[in-house]
Image: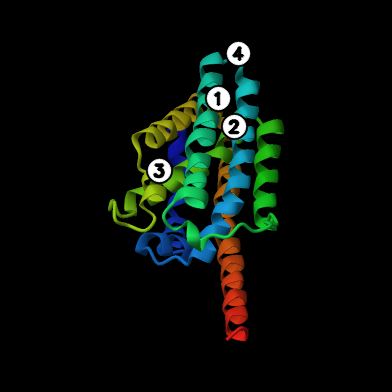
Amino acid sequence: MPFSRLHNALQSFMPLISTHSFNQGLLKGNLPFSVFNQFLMQDKYYLSHYAKALTNIAHRLHHQHQHDAKAFHTFANSIKKTEINMHHRYLNTHQSTRFFKPIATNINPAINAYIQHLHESTQTKPIPVAIAAMLPCFVIYRELGAIMPNNPEHRFYDWIKTYSSSGFLDNTEKMIAVFNAHDQVDLRDQALESFTASVQHEIKFWDSVIEVGELRGEKHAANTLRHH
């Protein structure tokens, strides 16, 4: 199957992904709220563009592959309804809201680079290459969802369960199926390159929110000390 080539490439990144301090913090429940808040603020912006990139593909598929186009509209709507609603829950109504303070968010360069890659891929690249760029956001979190604790008492349970839900897993499989259906042998190297670039962008995203979140935490601690 064409996707197996991408999946095999992902496995070489999984040790780094699964042991990344951001994902380990989620797994153990000890991720600083300053870091999680920074992630949510950046991710909300990222996902709005990710949904647009999914729609780009849907529009390109519409005339000749209406069934696949409908699937990509479904993926985009799922992102808008499920993921962004989850942000709303954590940023506004979750029991830990007191840890989150509204901040003026500057979108970091890692997110802007990722978004640029997605839009360029979905607007100008052949369909298999475009879909390959979108897959890591689904398949990486499917992998992470499988190793995260299924414990309602976990600090980030509502966030974690999104990536092991039947709806998310079903959409992941459907996107893989569409990718396989549009496979072209002469585009497989380009698709692999596009997929790998998105994997690397995901990792850089986590790197960036860890760095900025920790910096915010250090500044808050320093300001607290100065006022005592």
Q: Nearer the viewer, mark 1 or mark 4?
A: 1
Location of residue 178 with respect to 92 vertically, above or below: above
Q: Say which mark, if any, is on residue 162.
A: 3
Q: Earlier in the sequence, mark 2 or mark 1?
A: 2
The amino acid sitting under disc 3 is Thr
Q: Say which mark, if any, is on residue 54.
A: 2
How far is the residue under mark 2 from the one under mark 4?
17 Å
For this rendering, which residue is in front, 49 or 8? 49
Contact check, label 2 and label 1, Cβ < 8 Å: yes
Q: Nearer the viewer, mark 3 or mark 2?
A: 3
The residue carrying pointer 1 sits among few (fewer than 14), some (14 to 19) or many (20 or more) residues within 10 Å by Cα, namely: some
Q: How many marks?
A: 4
The amino acid sitting under disc 2 is Leu
Q: Say which mark, if any, is on residue 31.
A: none
Drawn side of residue 154 relative to residue 37, left or right: left
For the point 63% across and 13% down, which residue is it? 63
| Image coords of residue 50 (percent x, y) | 60, 39
Q: Say which mark, if any, is on residue 73.
A: 1
Q: Earlier in the sequence, mark 4 or mark 3?
A: 4
| Image coords of residue 142 (percent x, y) | 40, 44
Which SS class for mark 4? loop
Location of residue 145 with respect to 204 vertically, above or below: above
